[in-house]
Structure formats: C-alpha cells, structure tokens
Image: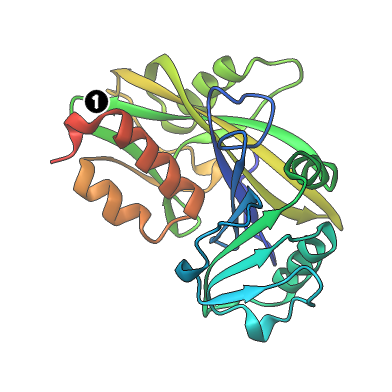
Amino acid sequence: MPASVNNSFGLSFLIPHYFDNLPVISPTQMKLFINDKPLKVIQFIPTLPVFEYDTIIGSAEEILSIRLVGKVLIQQATARQLERLIRIMELKRLKKLLSITFAVDDYEFMVEFIKDQFKVIKASGGVVRKQDKILLIFRLGKWDLPKGKLKKKEESLKAAKREVEEECSVKVDVKDKICSTWHTYVRKNKRILKRTDWYEMNCLDDSNMQPQLAEFIEDLKWMNYKEVMKSVKDSYASIQEVASEYYRLHSDLIR
C-alpha cells in the first residue's frame, strides 16, 4: 500500500466500531483532527457550557485566523464557516489553536455535508499484541501503526491482516474491531477522505519480523504502555487516539 503523507492540510476523526457507516462518535458528536488540531461537531443547545472556551464565535461572524486561539467555540455554526476553516487550514498551521467545537443546528446535515466534500478511500490496520506489548512501526519520521488500503472488493478485516503481515513480516490472529479513524489529504488537486478500520490482533509468530522497506518503514519495535504513549506523542493525532482507545479497552496493560 502507498505510504500516506500529510499535505498542506489534513483532517482525521475517530469513530467506535458500532458506527461503521457514519464518521461519528455518537448520534450527537463527530470528532475530527485538522492538522492534528481537534475539532468536534456537536448538536447546538442553548445551555452549552461556554465558560469552557477561550473564544466564542457566532454564526454570522467571519472566521479569521487571528481569532483561532486557545479553545474555540463556534455557536450555531454553518457549512460556510466549516468551508472557511478548511481553506484557512490549507494555508496556515494555527499554532496557537488548541481545539475547535462546531455547535450546529442541523447535526445530520453537517455530517452529510462533510462526507460529500471528499472522495472516500478505505484502509485497514492493526494493533498487534504480544504479551504486554504492542507493535509499532517507524515510518516517515514518526512512530505509527501498520495499515494500508483495501484492494478492490477486499473485506476490511482481511485487508488489515494482509497489510500487517506484509509490512511487518509477522503472523497474526485478528480479533475485535477497535475503531475507525478518518483523515483527509489533497492529491492531484482532489480532496481525499481516507477511512481506516483498526483491529485488535494477537501475534502468532514474529521470528521473521522485519520492516517492509518498500513502504518506507525503517524500524519495528515491541513497546509497553509507557513506551507506546511516549512514542506516539510525536505521531499523528489519529494514531494517538487509536492507542488511547486500545488501552481503554485493555486497562490491564496500563502500568
């Protein structure tokens, strides 16, 4: 599978496995990452705890990069404002921005609006466990998890197993689905939305383990909880989310 590289902007989001067809955390919340900055889309209610935010922007206000500082709330946000934010992210990194929350009047419309902006590509990957450690790959200067695109008509679970075994030269047994993450990138002037399904896996044999150099993987390493969380701290936000969700499901490994 071709290695995925972040371009001038990127967007990703995490969903639990029980929402397989929509990129949503819950019926009233979508969590995304734009250039590794968290963004939530939620249903607007008049009793939102506005005291939690540093900056509040109304639906009639223009989104300006100078105002995107700290924790930002956009009340009764519009699709136009979301489009504006993406355009800003194409040009700027917004280093002072911590998070953005879009509180919208029509949540379902906004979900569909976001999905309609991109060509969707499907991928799968795995969190491989061996005793109390999981397997990380070092690719393109970051610790990551093995993953890759689905072949035509390929099932997500089978693709995850194939990609992990190809990239790491290990044998695995696929277990339950953990979650799905979503991120965007621009390729040939087209916006791409890549969905990656993540699965729990047990290592059956790592005696021939080696990185797939053709996919720019430089190193492989079994890591315990502390090592994983330290390593992914400098990785992509979506990978941090997958690791956190995995350890939430396997709290016995947190020590």
Q: Residue furthest left?
A: 255
In the figure, is residue 46 to the left or right of 70?
Answer: right
Give how far across and how far down residue 214 sits, in percent.
56, 42
Which of the pair 52/101 is nearer the observer?
52
| Label 1, residues with CA under 10 Å away: few <14, some 14-19, many ≥20 | some
Residue 144 visible somewhere in the drawing: no
Residue lying at 36% horizontally and 58% vertically, measured from the top left: 233
Which of the pair 140/72 is nearer the observer?
72
Give how far across and how far down residue 13 sits, in percent.
59, 45
Q: Amino acid at mark 1?
A: Lys
Residue lying at 66% horizontally and 66% vertically, measured from the top left: 74
Give how far across and how far down residue 216 sits, in percent.
52, 48
Q: Quadrant of the C terminus?
A: top left
Q: Is residue 103 above or below residue 114?
A: below
Residue lying at 59% horizontally and 43% vertically, measured from the top left: 29
Q: Quadrant of the N terminus?
A: top right
Residue at mark 1: 130
Q: Is residue 8 above or below residue 181?
A: below
